Image (cartoon, coloured by chain):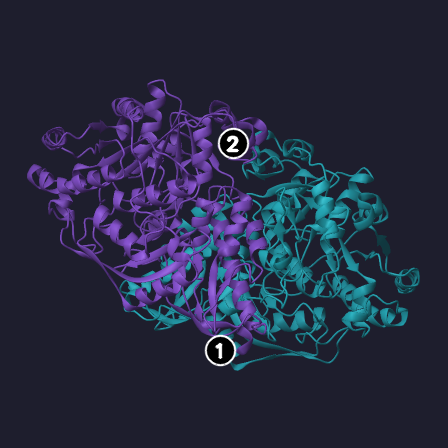
Chain colours: A cyan, B purple
Amino acid sequence: MNEDLKIAQAATLEDIETIAAKAGIAKEYLEPYGRDKAKVDTKIFASLKDRPDGKLILVTAITPTKAGEGKSTTTIGLVDGLNKIGKKAMGALREPSLGPVFGLKGGATGGGHAQVIPMEAINLHFTGDMHAITTANNLIAAMLDNSIYQGNPLNIDPTKVVWKRCMDMNDRTLRSITIAQDKKTNGVERKDGFVITVACEVMAILCLSKDLHDFQQRIARCVVAYTYDDKPVTVKDIQADGAATVVMKEALKPNLVQTLEHNPVLIHGGPFANIAHGCNSLIATKLALKLSDYVVTEAGFGADLGAEKFLDIKCRIGNLHPSAVVIVATVRALKMHGGVEQENLQTENVEAMLAGAENLQKHIDSIQAFGLPYVVAINKFVKDTPAEVDALLSWCKDHNHPVCLADGWAKGGAGMTELASCVSELCEKENHYAPIYDVNDSIEDKLTKIATTVYGAKDVEFSDEAKAKIVQFAKYGWDKLPVCVAKTQNSLSDDAKLKGRPRDFTVHVRDLSISAGAGFVVAYTGTILTMPGLPKVPAAVHMGVDENGNTYGLF
Amino acid sequence: MNEDLKIAQAATLEDIETIAAKAGIAKEYLEPYGRDKAKVDTKIFASLKDRPDGKLILVTAITPTKAGEGKSTTTIGLVDGLNKIGKKAMGALREPSLGPVFGLKGGATGGGHAQVIPMEAINLHFTGDMHAITTANNLIAAMLDNSIYQGNPLNIDPTKVVWKRCMDMNDRTLRSITIAQDKKTNGVERKDGFVITVACEVMAILCLSKDLHDFQQRIARCVVAYTYDDKPVTVKDIQADGAATVVMKEALKPNLVQTLEHNPVLIHGGPFANIAHGCNSLIATKLALKLSDYVVTEAGFGADLGAEKFLDIKCRIGNLHPSAVVIVATVRALKMHGGVEQENLQTENVEAMLAGAENLQKHIDSIQAFGLPYVVAINKFVKDTPAEVDALLSWCKDHNHPVCLADGWAKGGAGMTELASCVSELCEKENHYAPIYDVNDSIEDKLTKIATTVYGAKDVEFSDEAKAKIVQFAKYGWDKLPVCVAKTQNSLSDDAKLKGRPRDFTVHVRDLSISAGAGFVVAYTGTILTMPGLPKVPAAVHMGVDENGNTYGLF
């Protein structure tokens, strides 16, 4: 895996001013962070307002293995591939979270010869957006508890605080804690918990805001607690909206970097797709659309999570109209869906792979339900055998699914030209994109439509707690918002163990919460956690800096 | 107070490359963060190794009021004043913490016409050093608890974890918490707490490391817990030293900014002086000494805290030899020491001020005890009356103390030329600097020397807990390290209420902890808190962004 870091460290970076010029970003809007990354001042929008938007291409995937199926690699490779065939294309990606970097999965900057660089910086602190989000979130928390402590003028019930603290770290011990213990001067004791930063509402707001002004209005609306008589208390009520906006001022600006082949990519915002809405920022996507003819973006995990939220939440709020969808599949993951155990995934098994293809079929069905043209991209792994790859190609052709091999990992843009051509043709096709549900449907109906149409469930069961929340939320008009489902990424269902294409299952909604600032209702299914834990041997134990000051162990 | 932000926002910034050129930093070592701040690659040291060091000037102060007495303003003004009289001078300052920024005190970038800019950026996220420190600290904490959870191979006693989590925020509710509650899968339940980032050992190590390699060795040595049979467990034992170093790689590079008069200043590292060692980084100080003939630096709070630690810890570890000390005094604070209540400090009261001068006298005595030439700088406030200022000047002259008026706030460098001339003369004087204690003294003797010589105490009393720690620490050789006292900044004593020059008092050491990586023993006196709280009306409630995208309310 350290191959990736080696390739990235050996790469020659073009000066970010050169990349900006290539992307059509005038120097006056560029704020360099070092020589290899920059923020783009959002004042640039005024200068681009008469330009038509480019075509928007979404990269999604089948239900992945724990290591991920190379959605970022495919996205980055496709940007290079499109440029290779003479198209003006940019990427719009998510920022990595330190949780996976130090935990299990590693970074999120692609792999092999399809990477964005500077890989190390992007995977670590980058331009500080994650840190700003963490700070804004925790400032609100501190001001909330301070208000309770300093005489509680807003009559907040300390048992009804809903705003959690956050940290960009896999730290299971912070999931459920008691704060303000031992002394009265430590505040008012209560139960609390941390979520990982990529799951917090500030992250969602960053990603769904049109501009800084919109951000300030959204953050002001966030519900942080309820009073003793059950009235919502907002960030505005505790007077934290202004300061939180000041903290986020720089973070609202998209970040510009480059692929290994020196094509421009904006990386901005990074909510997880299992516990949040899973898409990069609307500001970056809109900027890329103004700057480029083709914009390739990705949404986290499988099409049941990231793509559903991209198409039902982000595109709806941002008034975006995607032109095509790439569905990434791997031989490895299909074998898993066909019943092969983790330790045997590297052994050839055509039969299992073909059995697992029903998972791919379900994700294709879902994308068709949204009315969008698609292509299956087979992301090639070194250990895939020719028999497996041929069988998967044949399966796609037999089922009339457009399909291309994607070999960005080994060959960069040169391995992605076939897919690039196919995608550019799809973009010319008529499409009938529409969200799956109407926002005016009831919360129950919206969730049922997602569960049955996208997950393939039989029905949805609501806990008593969820039912009570639905009644409560309707009182405040929150039932007219889109819904964001927190669900395991390891299955189409809410049970991580069910691989392939589960049928006749029930989705269990155990609780709901309101993200009034982001503008959606969150539905928690199964046992999904909003704060991950570290594995037995965290990736972090292999990292260090050698005697020459070079990082090792980061992947 | 918003005057400061107005002046800073109206300032014309020179491009940071111009400032770097002025400071003698070659472009190849400069890593710009935007157009107005940059990190300096520490590879520059090799190119400067044959240059002689400049003169090092420390700015300290009397026991301050809660608003601070303008040490940063004086430091910055003195840099401009020295340049004004034709000397090549640089500043070496500390990075502000977000705790005071959102809490009571505001930013730490000077005031009026003696400021460093970009003021907003420096006071908020700057180049991300605080965030990197927070992340490194909390990664170590997460890996520690993960080791306990994943079978506890190191036999760690969960009740003997000494490494706390941290956050750069005033959040009293995190002082004393219980983590890992409710479910076994949330980890092993135990008592825990957060400190403010500027109090954590990673910050101290950043500030005392010679280079990245030294940092990695120091972080590896940090004690995080004890086993069931009382053996120390280190960061190296939990295999977090490499990853923590990777996280801190960029943060180890000093940050370059400019004064309003476009003179270069390095701002790097920022431990509080009441709960930590209170000095900017050794790397930045050493770089400034190589680049400049005069380096003006500051150490937090009064001379009992920052200056003592600068002279006993930082200069000892870094082999620095300061040339002169500036002791900042204000009419306002002296009146407080003379018994005037907060609400009456703006009323003329010569008598009280002269009574309060005994506080100044004690700080002068302490600096003399270190064998250093000094000058009193009267930092002028608009509300000071001529009678008060004249009386203070006369008092200094009557007591044979060199004294100058410092008017950097109103006039910038032009108001600081007299002090600049005086300081440059002091630098030519022979001096007999030596630390107050020998590191080979016992912990009791070291603390007694600091308390009696610097604080003016009668003696020191150790709690049973502290006594037990002294015995334990000696077993590991930690008794041969310098000591860092955590003590209130509001009094020379450990009782915040005792103003002026307390006499015949006892200092109470209630507990000790080891910072084996930073290389000192911390002694906790009185009731000093390592996590502050927000005041009734936090500064944050006044902050926001206006319709033009400009920040207001930051000071």
Mark 1, residue position: B182
**Residue at 73% from the left image edge and 58% from the top image edge:** A60
Where is residue A12 drawn, in percent x and y? 71, 36
* Callout 1: chain: B
Image coordinates for residue B272, horizontal then vertical, percent? 35, 48
Considering only order in the chain, which callout, 2 or 1, is on the residue closer to the N terminus? 2
Q: Amino acid at mark 1?
A: Asp
Name the residue type under label 2: Arg
Q: Which residue is mark 2?
A: B35
Residue occupying the point 8% across, 39% down: B349
* Residue B258, quarter of the rendered image: top left
User: In which chain is the residue bearing label 2?
Assistant: B
Return the mark for residue B196.
none
Residue found at the very far front of the displayed protein: B440
Q: Residue furthest left?
A: B351
Disc 1 to disc 2, C-alpha distance? 49 Å
* Label 1 with label 2: CB-CB less than 8 Å: no
| Residue A235 visible in the shown view | no
Residue B159 position within the rendered picture, expressed as x and y whole percent measured from the top left: 43, 72
Left-right relation of A177 to B459: right
Q: Nearer the viewer, residue B86 or A97?
A: B86
- Left-right relation of A432 to A536: right
Foreground mark, 1 or 2, reads: 1
Q: Secondary structure at mark 1?
A: loop
Q: Secondary structure at mark 2?
A: loop
Q: Horizontal placement of A93 versus A440: left or right? A: right
Residue sitting at x 39%, y 46%: B544
Relative height, residue B457 to residue B474 (above, below): above
Q: Taking the image as drawn, is residue B426 in sight?
A: yes
What's the residue at 42%, 53% (across, down)? B197
The reply to the same-chain question for discs 1 and 2 is: yes
